[in-house]
């Protein structure tokens, strides 16, 4: 059965191509100068014209404190055909599941809630990842969490000595009264002169005068001021027609323009890249591609054998997928009905609207139908079936919760607590589902495609 | 160009939903339109239209038109700074430059009209 | 293929408590086109299991004007013949967008069940808690339990549970075109309800061509004699039934079935001032009249319109065919509202309200608003018009209002929408078999 197909963007074709070859175990080397033309390379020596690639091991943080924006990573990594992607919550991180990971990606949410959720153990694991030469990429709250805070008791990772440039003791007068304008940060305020699309100017490498700029959306992420130990990859350069001003344009320009939007900091063998804007937003393929470039940049030179196929595969029972589909459909139907209901829930410090349920459901739903078709043709070997089973349990529970929630909303009864439990469950459900999905996602080339790929040069060049 | 709604003329035929669904999906689909026919009070025969706009929800009810701001959680208070936009249903973009508005064309009653 | 059609038949085996799916082959589509004709073919295929077939037309749920129709086909407990009942509102479209073109329901459940059809998934669920609920309570309960008020529901009330041959399959809360006692078949199968939610999507082979033709036909509709007409009052005028004054104390708003340019349904309110437009706390202020004949009998009986609304509401809740109920009241000269309501559940046939053909007489047997060239021989013309409507998925009453919705145009819509190449001869063959 077909479903709505709004919002299909052009994917980052080049990255998709690399990943498709890699997953089919066809050797790929890349022209490092081309691939990383905007990002200084710490791990690749500049005289090396090409580097061999292997499938990167990626983890997306989906633990407590995150907003639904981690699902944007799902969308873009899937589109770019990354396959070894794991989704981790705070317990997974602190129990050592970052051990095999090359890149950890952390999106938006509540900075302190993410930091607190990870706890001391989790933070140590992140530092271990960096010590091993891994990449930490954080956007918005995921970026703030790594910055040295003005107050030492905020419990942040404090690894990057950059100053958040929009922290003030006293707030300038906003254009319109809005909660989006400011939020407390320790005992000061972070304020947000704009929301939505901003233009970023990428710093040129090696004195290259041809500046490139990309756009990405800003939803509460920081402008930063960096010292010499930190490389400013991109600066806020301009606003666009899609920028939403919350303060006067003059204040917005003063606070943002010329400040660092993306920074890069070496930490031991690893690298920390922090971005104010959401480079992972699926509507911005150029920005998405930067993330992919960073991921490829942080694969150690020596190819490592992916552990995917060393795990035990289980026999697949198609009834499981149908059970999941049944429940996701049930949730989807109620979430669609809630969309027309004027309600929101206060969970922690944030407000959640019914549409957010829809985002969780839609991201899974869009993949379920595809997966169903793919798996129908798959013979029997599938991985992480346990995750699929767990996701069904969460989904059955979520169906009950959302139906109860709908009734409470209809009867105008308080429903914040139930909504909080539902969102928790949806997040767990999604984590399990994507761990199953990415593990079994193989872009199988036909034999003819393989022959063509092999007959081509193994050095893969960017189209410029 | 503006979309003018006269909810009293509406007969809840849902043609506008389908037309707008086509505008977004290039297919027939009842769930992605910016225009929603509000028809959940079937036993009361109470129906109207909801239009998702960029910043607002326009509620066209039989008793009149009301505009609700999206993301406003209490009167005058909007969702906080790092609230991420939801992209499930597209906001009406007046068919992005098409000569006619699709929902208006397929509306049989004149409940939807092009206005200035 | 797959344009405008799911290519998917749902088979429900109530005896085995199992569901399965069958692929709808292109050849099969060309041979039967759709709607009632395909229903008949499926009926014969599963004849031994006393099946109920619910089918959509190729144009059901599309932007083709009037594309609201689904058809229930089964052996009528009242006539003993295979008959077709039209189902409109949003039920046909909902079924189609739920991922199935046809549903075959065979066998008998051990205990009461309801079907929950959604996103190409069909569940046979326990309905013990629904049994003995009236039709309205059943729809309310299912919509509440499943969490969506837009769920469309075919259901039965007390009459269906009793397997009375006066039992009607109720569409959500309102009358369907079932004059055949199909409600009794639901009851016999211990099938209380079929709840449906459709959130799918259809491509079109030539989308521009299809949509332009839909628009052209809609504009013809808007520029025809239908323009400015509304509800059952204007249909009544065409049938020489002057309803305006009689209905005035209860007249609320008119509305349409899915993508039907003519608002043929009229809401009558006796529970509150019908002129109030905004939502009030009165939960059940009246009834939606989807079939003009539902009220004509009670008018003939001499009831006021207010009393008619009250009686009609009870008929719909009890799940008795209101036309048959009115006929019984007339035969028994029963004029007290309280008496009628108290005895509805015990009404028994036979009553002669089934017409002479396999198509429901809920559709007036003459053209309405616009004249057709070939309607001189009214009975033949009407039957052919019904066959065409029931095959393609066009609202049966809209089809007798719309000469511009010619067979050629409907066929053209089907062919450009699906990419199939169905000829007029194919149509003739299908019509001849019906
Ligand atoms: S004007 Fe276009 S985009 Fe807006 S509601 Fe109508 S069809 Fe949809
Ligand atoms: S098309 Fe017109 S009449 Fe039909 S539901 Fe939309 S606004 Fe109402």
Image (tube, coloured by chain):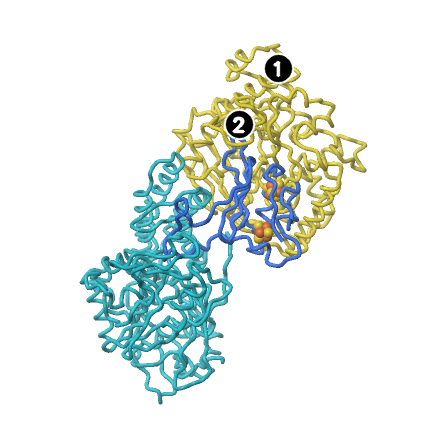
Chain colours: A cyan, B blue, C yellow
Which residue is found at the position 38% from the left and 87% from the top? A49
Alpha carbon distance from label 1 to label 2: 26 Å
Which residue is found at the position 31% from the left and 53% from the top? A428
Task: Specify whether disc 1 shares its chain with disc 2.
Answer: yes
Residue A202, quarter of picture: bottom left
Instruction: List the residue tagged with mark 1.
Output: C303
The answer to whether A267 is drawn above or below residue A437 in the figure is: below
**Residue C382 shows up from this direction:** yes
Q: Nearer the observer, disc 1 or disc 2?
A: 1
Q: Secondary structure at mark 1?
A: loop
- Horizontal side, residue C64 vs residue C344: left or right: right
Residue C24 on image: x %, y %: 56, 49
Instruction: List the residue tagged with mark 2.
Output: C183
Residue A396 on image: x %, y %: 34, 45
Which residue is found at the position 48% from the left and 74% from the top? A449
- Horizontal side, residue A306 vs residue C46: left or right: left
**Residue A322 shows up from this direction:** no
Residue C28 on image: x %, y %: 61, 48
Which dot marks residue A130? none
**Residue C198 vs residue B62, the one in the foreground:** B62
- Horizontal side, residue A147 vs residue C316: left or right: left
At label 1, counting other C-alpha atoms closer than 10 Å, the crowd grade (few under 14, some 14-19, many 20 or more) is some
The answer to whether B101 is drawn above or below residue C343 in the figure is: below
At label 2, counting other C-alpha atoms closer than 10 Å, the crowd grade (few under 14, some 14-19, many 20 or more) is many
């Amino acid at each position: 059965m077909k479903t709505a197909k709004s919002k299909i963007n052009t994917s980052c074709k080049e990255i998709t191509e690399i990943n498709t070859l890699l997953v089919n175990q066809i050797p790929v080397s890349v022209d490092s100068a081309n691939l990383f033309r905007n990002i200084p390379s710490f791990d690749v020596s500049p005289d090396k014209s090409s580097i061999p690639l292997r499938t990167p091991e990626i983890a997306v943080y989906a633990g407590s404190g995150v907003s639904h924006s981690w699902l944007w990573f799902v969308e873009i990594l899937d589109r770019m055909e990354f396959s070894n992607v794991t989704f981790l919550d705070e317990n997974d991180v602190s129990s050592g599941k970052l051990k095999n990971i090359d890149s950890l990606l952390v999106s938006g949410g509540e900075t302190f809630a993410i930091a607190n959720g990870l706890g001391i153990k989790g933070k140590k694991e992140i530092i271990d990842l960096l010590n091993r030469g891994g990449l930490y990429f954080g956007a918005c709250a995921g970026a703030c969490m790594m910055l040295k805070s003005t107050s030492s008791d905020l419990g942040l990772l404090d690894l990057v000595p950059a100053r958040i440039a929009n922290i003030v003791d006293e707030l300038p007068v906003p254009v319109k009264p809005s909660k989006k304008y400011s939020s407390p940060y320790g005992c000061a305020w972070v304020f947000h002169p704009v929301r939505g699309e901003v233009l970023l100017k990428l710093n040129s490498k090696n004195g290259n005068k041809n500046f490139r700029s990309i756009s990405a959306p800003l939803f509460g992420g920081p402008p930063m001021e960096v010292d010499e130990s930190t490389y400013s990859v991109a600066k806020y350069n301009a606003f666009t027609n899609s920028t939403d001003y919350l303060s006067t344009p003059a204040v917005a320009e003063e606070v943002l323009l010329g400040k660092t939007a993306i920074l890069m900091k070496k930490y031991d063998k690893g690298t920390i890249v922090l971005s104010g804007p959401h480079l992972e937003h699926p509507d911005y393929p150029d920005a998405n591609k930067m993330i992919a470039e960073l991921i490829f940049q942080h694969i150690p030179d020596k190819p490592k054998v992916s552990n995917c196929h060393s795990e035990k595969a289980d026999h697949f029972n198609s009834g499981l997928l149908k059970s999941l589909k049944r429940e996701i459909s049930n949730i989807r139907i109620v979430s669609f009905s809630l969309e027309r209901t004027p309600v929101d829930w206060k969970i922690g410090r944030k407000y959640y609207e019914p549409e957010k349920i829809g985002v969780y459901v839609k991201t899974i739903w869009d993949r379920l139908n595809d997966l169903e078709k793919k798996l129908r043709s798959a013979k029997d070997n599938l991985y992480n079936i346990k995750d699929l089973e767990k996701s069904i349990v969460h989904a059955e529970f979520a169906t009950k919760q959302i139906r109860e929630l709908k009734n409470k909303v209809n009867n105008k009864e308080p429903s914040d607590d139930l909504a909080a439990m539902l969102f928790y469950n949806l997040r767990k459900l999604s984590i399990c589902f994507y761990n199953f999905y990415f593990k079994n996602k193989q872009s199988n080339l036909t034999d003819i495609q393989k022959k063509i790929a092999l007959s081509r040069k193994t050095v893969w060049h960017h189209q410029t | 160009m503006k979309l003018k709604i006269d909810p009293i003329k509406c007969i809840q035929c849902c043609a506008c939903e389908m037309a707008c669904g086509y505008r977004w999906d290039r297919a027939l689909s009842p769930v992605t339109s910016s225009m929603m026919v509000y028809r959940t009070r079937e036993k009361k025969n109470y129906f109207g239209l909801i239009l998702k706009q960029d910043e607002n929800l326009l509620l066209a009810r039989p008793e009149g038109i009301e505009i609700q701001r999206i993301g406003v959680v209490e009167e005058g208070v909007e969702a906080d700074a790092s609230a991420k936009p939801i992209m499930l249903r597209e906001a009406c973009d007046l068919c992005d430059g098409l000569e006619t508005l699709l929902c208006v064309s397929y509306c049989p009653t004149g409940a939807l009209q092009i206005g200035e | 293929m797959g344009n405008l059609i799911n290519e998917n038949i749902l088979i429900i085996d109530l005896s085995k408590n199992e569901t399965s799916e069958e692929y709808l082959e292109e050849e099969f589509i060309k041979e039967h086109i759709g709607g009632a004709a395909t229903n008949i073919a499926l009926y014969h295929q599963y004849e031994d299991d006393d099946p109920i077939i619910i089918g959509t037309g190729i144009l059901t749920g599309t932007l083709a004007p009037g594309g609201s129709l689904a058809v229930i086909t089964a052996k009528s407990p009242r006539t003993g013949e295979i008959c077709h009942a039209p189902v409109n509102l949003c039920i046909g479209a909902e079924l189609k967008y739920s991922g199935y073109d046809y549903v075959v329901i065979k066998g008998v459940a051990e205990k009461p069940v309801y079907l929950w059809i959604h996103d190409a998934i069909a569940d046979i669920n326990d309905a013990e808690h629904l049994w003995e609920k009236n039709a309205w309570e059943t729809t309310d309960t299912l919509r509440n339990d499943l969490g969506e008020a837009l769920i469309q529901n075919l259901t039965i009330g007390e009459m269906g549970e009793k397997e009375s041959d006066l039992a009607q399959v109720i569409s959500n809360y309102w009358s369907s075109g079932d004059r055949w006692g199909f409600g009794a078949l639901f009851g016999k199968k211990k099938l209380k309800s079929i709840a449906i939610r459709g959130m799918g999507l259809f491509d079109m082979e030539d989308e521009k061509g299809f949509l332009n033709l839909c628009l052209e036909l809609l504009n013809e509709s808007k520029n025809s004699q239908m323009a400015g007409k509304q509800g059952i009052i204007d249909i009544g005028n065409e049938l020489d039934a002057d309803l305006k004054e009689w209905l005035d104390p209860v007249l609320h708003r008119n509305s349409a079935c899915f993508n039907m340019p003519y608002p043929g349904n009229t809401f009558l309110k006796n529970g509150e001032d019908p002129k109030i437009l905004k939502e009030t706390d009165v939960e059940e202020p009246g009834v939606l009249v989807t079939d003009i004949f539902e009220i004509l009998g009670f008018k003939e009986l001499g009831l006021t319109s207010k009393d008619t609304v009250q009686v009609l509401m009870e008929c719909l809740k009890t799940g008795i065919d209101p036309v048959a109920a009115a006929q019984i009241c007339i035969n028994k000269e029963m004029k007290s509202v309280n008496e009628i309501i108290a005895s509805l559940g015990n009404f028994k046939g036979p009553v002669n309200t089934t017409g002479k053909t396999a198509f429901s007489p809920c559709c007036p047997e003459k053209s309405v608003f616009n004249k057709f060239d070939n309607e001189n021989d009214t009975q033949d013309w009407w039957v052919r018009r019904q066959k065409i409507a029931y095959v393609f998925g066009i609202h049966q009453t809209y089809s007798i209002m719309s000469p511009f919705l010619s067979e050629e145009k409907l066929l053209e819509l089907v062919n450009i929408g699906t990419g199939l190449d169905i000829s007029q001869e194919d149509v003739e063959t299908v019509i001849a078999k019906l």
